[in-house]
Amino acid sequence: MLLLASASPARRRLLEQAQIPHQVMVSGVDEDQIQHPDPAQLVQLLAEAKASAVKLKVEQSAELSPSIKAVLGCDSVLAFEGEVFGKPVDAAEAIARWQRMRGKWAELHTGHCLVLPSFARSRAGEAAEMQRRCVTTRVLFANLTDAEVKAYVASGEPLQCAGGFALEGRGGCCVEQLNGCYSNVIGLSLPLLRRWLALS
């Protein structure tokens, strides 16, 4: 059983669609305390912090311990013209971002960290105790009109997502092209996770 150290419903849906048995435990990590100028490094640090915090909780829980094979932490940010975009704080910020991003490329970085609880390591053979990686997908945004931008932001969806869009939702109509892993933009790279779970 995989334990997802994330409250993201999009990540949970990806695991459900891929039929990967899992449970969810939110880490409680204060993300504002973790900073790094490189977005690819930042998401890896955040993913590791989440996975490590949940791993510790699991090791202290006799109820969960027998069924958990590994803990997965993830975090995503959008990098655009040297800036890192998490979730917009409000509609005005979301509109301003979209007016800048429309018709241009950005990079969606998702950090992944898979850790094995101490009780699972003996069952895992040669698998590493911790694996950490950032997967990056380039995103080309549609050249939306001001009216289209405001209508999308008014839906509320951009306020819930890193980068201000949800590829699997209405935001899918606002993206022209992807270069890289599709599921990574939604919240985690399923191809990477498949490779990791085959080794853990």
Image (spheres, rainbow, N blue to C red):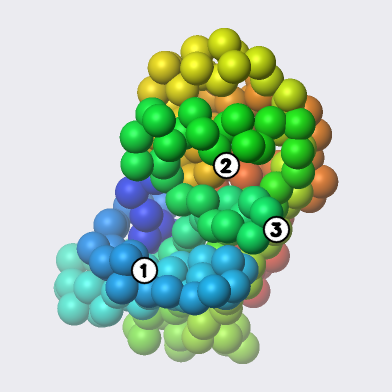
> Marks 3 and 2, how far apart in space?
12 Å
Q: Amino acid at mark 1?
A: Lys
Q: Amino acid at mark 3?
A: Thr
Which is more toward the observer, 176 or 150?
150
Q: Exactly how many numbered labels are in the figure?
A: 3
For the question of whether residue 137 can be seen, the reply is yes
Q: Which residue is mark 3?
A: 136
Question: Residue 45, relative to residue 187: is it above or below?
Answer: below
**Residue at 42% across / 17% down in the picture?**
155
Q: Position of residue 99 (x, y in %)?
A: 60, 30
Q: Which residue is mark 1?
A: 50
Which is more toward the observer, 190 or 77?
77
Q: Amino acid at mark 2?
A: Ile
Which is more toward the observer, 199 or 57?
57
Tag in front: 3 or 2 = 3
Which is more toward the observer, 198 or 37?
37
Q: Position of residue 172 (x, y in %)?
A: 64, 25
Closer to the chain start, of discs 2 and 1, is 1
Q: Which residue is mark 2?
A: 186
